[in-house]
């Protein structure tokens, strides 16, 4: 079996995600940016901040769900060891 080096470098999302090169691109829409710009427009900035909030929310929910899963697991199979400090 031979390993395809490009697939290693690019990864599964390589085709979609723009590679950070000398010319920067708007993370919102992929439009070329000048050096001082972070996004091409206020529209994209709003979009990105929405996206970031959604990401934060998603990770919060993920953590909450993990905690819930752990709590449910703890209730359904209680550990024999008791490390309760009084
Ligand atoms: Zn943009």
Image: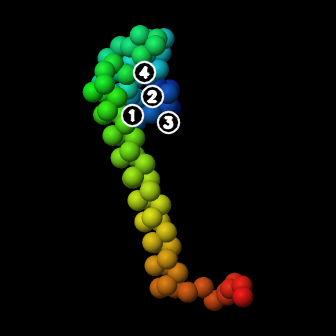
For label 3, the residue is 1
How far from the left and from the top, in percent, is residue 21?
A: 47, 15
N-terminal of the two: label 3 or label 1? 3
Marks 2 and 3 in Cβ contact (< 8 Å): no
Q: Which mark is residue 38?
A: 4
Q: Is residue 84 left or right of residue 64?
A: right
Horizontally, residue 26 falls left or right of residue 74, namely: left
Which tag is nearer the camera, tag 4 or tag 3?
Answer: 4
Q: Is residue 35 left or right of residue 53?
A: right
> Residue 70's x, y, as percent?
50, 73
Q: Nearer the viewer, mark 4 or mark 2?
A: 4
Do we see residue 4 in this rendering? no
The CA span between labels 4 and 2 is 24 Å
**Label 4 environment density (alpha carbons within 10 Å; few <14, some 14–19, many ≥20):** some
Q: Nearer the viewer, residue 23 or 48?
A: 48
**Is 72 situated above or below 48?**
below
Q: Are marks 1 and 2 in contact (CB under 8 Å)?
A: yes
Q: CA distance from mark 4 to mark 1?
A: 22 Å
Q: Secondary structure at mark 1?
A: loop
- The circle on residue 57 is none
Between 53 and 68, which is closer to the camera in this rendering? 53
Residue that numbered label 1 is attached to: 13
Q: Position of residue 74 (x, y in %)?
A: 52, 81
Query: Residue tagged by mark 2?
Result: 10
Give SS at disc 2: helix
- Mark 4 or mark 2, earlier in chain: 2
Q: Name above or below for residue 69 compared with residue 9.
A: below
| Quarter of image, res 78 | bottom right
């Amino acid at each position: 079996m031979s390993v395809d080096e490009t697939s290693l470098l690019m990864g599964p999302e390589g085709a979609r995600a723009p590679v950070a090169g000398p010319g920067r691109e708007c993370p919102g829409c992929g439009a070329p940016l000048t050096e001082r710009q972070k996004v091409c427009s206020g529209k994209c900035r709003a979009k990105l901040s929405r996206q970031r909030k959604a990401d934060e929310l998603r990770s919060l929910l993920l953590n909450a769900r993990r905690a819930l899963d752990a709590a449910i697991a703890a209730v359904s199979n209680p550990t024999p060891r008791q490390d309760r400090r009084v």
